[in-house]
Amino acid sequence: MRAFVVNELDGALNCGLVDAAAVATDPSDVLIQVEYSGVNYKDALVAAAPSRVRRVTTLVGGVDAAGVVAESSDPDLAVGTRVAVHGHDLGVGRDGGFAEYLYAPSNLINVLPETISTRDAMVIGTAGFTAMASVLALEDHGLEDGDVLVTGATGGVGSMAITLLALRGHDPVASTGSVQESAWLRERGAVRVIGRDEISDRLDRVLASERWAGAVDCIGGETLHQVLRSLRYGSSVAASGLVAGTELTTSIYPFITRAVSLLGVDAVQASRATRERVWSALGEMAPRLDVAPLIDREVTLEELADAIDVVRRGATRGRILVRPTTD
């Protein structure tokens, strides 16, 4: 089969298309014929040397994929079932979705709702799953009326979060460094578009003005600090990004004087119950969810290296889809 392999040898990185066999790591693994995958920022981190996320020196990349079950001993995953697979060590410690076939354990496999095609599942992808989980986390915490900030708004998680928030009756405000994409972000549902430096004010004080009813942060670092200091009393931020760094320097004041909450959102180790809830919510929204504008481009395995570089530079507008087959 055709596969995009990441290989690091003595600090030198080699990424490219090869002929490779799909390999099961356990007899119970399910074989999936991949119809689509997507390029995530995590894939760019895997395809780097040194990599702080890749756990092995050689593997097929791709942290998510969608397709149909080709071989299975699991009665809940019959041959022909349409599925999405993501999370845990897929594309990080074991072969991932940048291939025509992949083996995966059943706990990473999600049966797709009837309303979601395999192509749409990868427009949603890990990014959309994270966005939906973020919105649900905010709502669970009691998201009230008012502006909901979304940072990194042109990226995969951010753009999907704006769309989902708008469809669920909230008022998303898009924060981005790509102000030229303002019209596109408004089309996705943003009520307003602001620059990165407009998240908070009163920089000479511990706390900024109370501006946001909630927030989805896809950036981390200093951006998350500015979000925390400008949240309204009792509100929360669902955080899943680390593009700006893994360190958070802030104060205790937002937490004890405004009772704000920092909600971590994880798509990697998510439980089966969480996965089912998120995909079910996405399935319910699918008839109203126009994913076509969220597609940045569609690429082949031959074009994948360039696409990964585009994602690494943060130069996307939505999702890059990967189709491993040429027919």
Image (cartoon, rainbow, N blue to C red):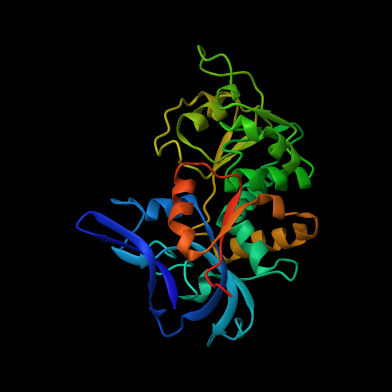
Residue extending furthest toward the top: 204
> Which residue is at a point 46% across and 80% down the rendered structure image?
29
| Vertical placement of residue 145 versus 168, above or below | above
Left or right placement of residue 291 versus residue 105 in this view? right
Residue under the image location 43 percent in, 33 percent down: 248
Q: In this orientation, does residue 68 appear?
A: yes
Give residue 41's position: percent from left, percent from top: 47, 50
Q: Is residue 107 above or below residue 31?
A: above
* Residue 228, position as x, y percentages in the image: 55, 29
Q: Position of residue 145 (x, y in %)?
A: 77, 34
Q: Which is more toward the observer, 221 or 273?
A: 221
Can residue 62 be seen at all in this image of the molecule? no
Counting the numbered discs, the total is 0
On-image quarter of the N terminus: bottom left
Residue 149: x, y in percent?
65, 33
Residue drawn 70% across the image and 39% down it: 184
Q: In the picture, which quadrant includes the C terminus?
A: bottom right
Residue at 35% over, 60% down: 15
Residue 119 shown left or right of residue 222 in the figure: right
In depth, the one of 210 and 82 nearer the eye is: 82
